[in-house]
Amino acid sequence: MSDQRPILTTRQGHPVRDNQSLRTVGERGPATLENYQFIEKITHFDRERIPERVVHARGAGAHGYFEAYGTIGGEPASKYTRARVLNETGVKTPMFVRFSTVAGAKESPETARDPRGFAVKFKTVDGNWDLVGNNLKVFFIRDAIKFPDMIHAFKPDPVTNRQEAWRFFDFVAAHPESIHMVTHLKSPWGIPANYREMEGSGVNTYKLVNDQGVAHLCKFHFIPKQGVRNLTSAQAAEIQGRDVGHATKDLYDNIAAGNFPEWEFAVQIMPDGPNEHLSFDPLDDTKLWPVDQFPLLPCGRMVLDRVPDNFFADVEQSAFGTGVLVDGIDFSDDKMLQGRTLSYSDTQRYRVGPNYLQLPINAPAPGVKTSTNQRDGQMTFYVDGVGENKHINYEPSTIGQGLREAPKPAKEYHQPVEGKLGRYQTSRTEDDYTQAGVRYRSFEEWEREDLIANLVADMKECPEAIQLRMVWHFWHADEDYGRRVAEGAGIDLEKAKALPPLPGRAAPHKRLAAETYTDGTQAHKVAAE
Ligand code: HEM
């Protein structure tokens, strides 16, 4: 039977007749330099890696689609937003999703105790919309200028090249706003069982804008129809002994078996404005919006039904950013969101290259025509459509050719802004403990036990100054929480309680309001205090 397989060629299209042997002078002689076939093969190989992501390097991705319900919490979605992706029913908006861990390198274990990245690209009829979030719904810090310091403390030590618990807690101890996230992270919620059985959240606060130009503040969440499942440290260690890529395997196996993971997409909404009656700042991403005050309003569903044909092309080269919004969805003044928005496209121009948006994985859906006057740069793959006159790569043109501006929406949203330019601490209430305490008490006892055991092990790695300050924080969140960590790690609770407030921070006042929250999927409804 004749061999029907395609013929191997070089990139120049030349057939390769011998892929086994270098061209040499005689059987045992030196190789020659004009051997183009060999040089092309090796030099391309030498360039196979691009820099890994500076954070979230380990990940897996899948393709799928989004279907809008056309309603938000039962009301027409158009009441809140003119974004067509949330209004038009019966449309399957293509999506690509990348899940990740944060601190580990590209091939690090997926059992890591780490937040999970949950980055979503909606390829909508109005162009791309990216939501770059995590599974824990909150974050460690609320001011973008702190991010590089935080990541330095969480990534491996520059001397030992190991993640060191004392460096992590050295940073955390100086940031009470991180205690809420740390309480999630050190509990079983810090190791989701896989990528399918976890929540997702945009974390930062955005705005929905309707066609009257009226804005509401909002938060976006993905609720897994599969439910939520987390691991204890012991369960994770057992899995890691067998497999460092178990979550990718779980995702790929389930999709291959036709067991497509699905999430409900829900939004929390509040009026735009200072919302001064609230005991937390809605622009502070270290806080949840309690769901009894701001219910999760369903507005669509996301299904993942196809794994990438090639990991590098789709997953490694994928580029998500918080600046990628469509008309009807806008930025809020959440300081983290503002800072992140610079960072993503900046790093992607470096990591992938200046034309990263021409790659199929990052380009808008095929039906969406991109027409820019951006030209050239490394790896230009095509020139955008410019109309009849290909000379005109500028705008405006007096002879009325080239590209034109899009029509403006009937009512534009103009955000009123006033204030004195300066450097401000963000939190309005400075209550960084209530939600951490509510979270602690919301855990089931096995979760609390795992949390305490993990923190006790970490505290034993820390010098006394960090131990005392951390117990002080835990005790202010919940007295039982502080006491159990202190007892477990042999830390003097009375000495910790006697510490003064942190320099530059107000004395903690917790439990400002009788607030509750649920995490949306679990039955962790906490009674009001
Ligand atoms: C000021 C704060 C932050 C900065 C400066 C920042 C910066 C970055 C950078 C540079 C990357 C690598 C992107 C790439 O190479 O393509 C990244 C990835 C990522 N970040 Fe952030 N980040 C910040 C906060 C956050 C927060 C609060 C979240 C979650 C809510 C988050 C979620 C993610 C995710 C999910 C990815 C991975 C995206 C992917 O899968 O490609 N980041 N971030």
Image (tube, rainbow, N blue to C red):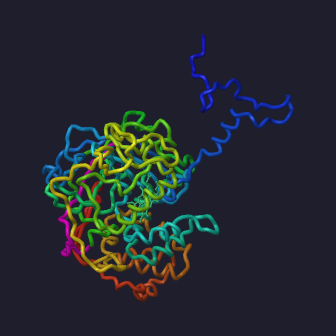
Q: Residue at x 25, y 55 (%)?
A: 329
* Magenta stretch bounds: 261-280
The residue most toward the front is 399
Q: Which quarter of the picture shows residue 273?
A: bottom left
Find residue 500 and report its horizontal and vertical position in percent.
41, 89
Find residue 478 and report its horizontal and vertical position in percent.
35, 76
Q: Left or right of 522: which side holds 29?
A: right
Of residue 421 and residue 134, the one placed in the foreground of this image is 421
The residue most toward the top is 1
Of residue 28 and residue 108, the one placed in the foreground of this image is 28
Q: Reply yes or no: does residue 269 show up in magenta.
A: yes
Find residue 269 and report its horizontal and vertical position in percent.
20, 60
Q: Relative to 40, say whether 127 is above or below.
A: below
Regarding residue 203, the answer to whether it shows in the image is yes
Which quadrant, please, contains the C terminus? bottom left
Q: Reply yes or no: does residue 36 show up in magenta.
A: no
Regarding residue 292, the answer to whether it shows in the image is no
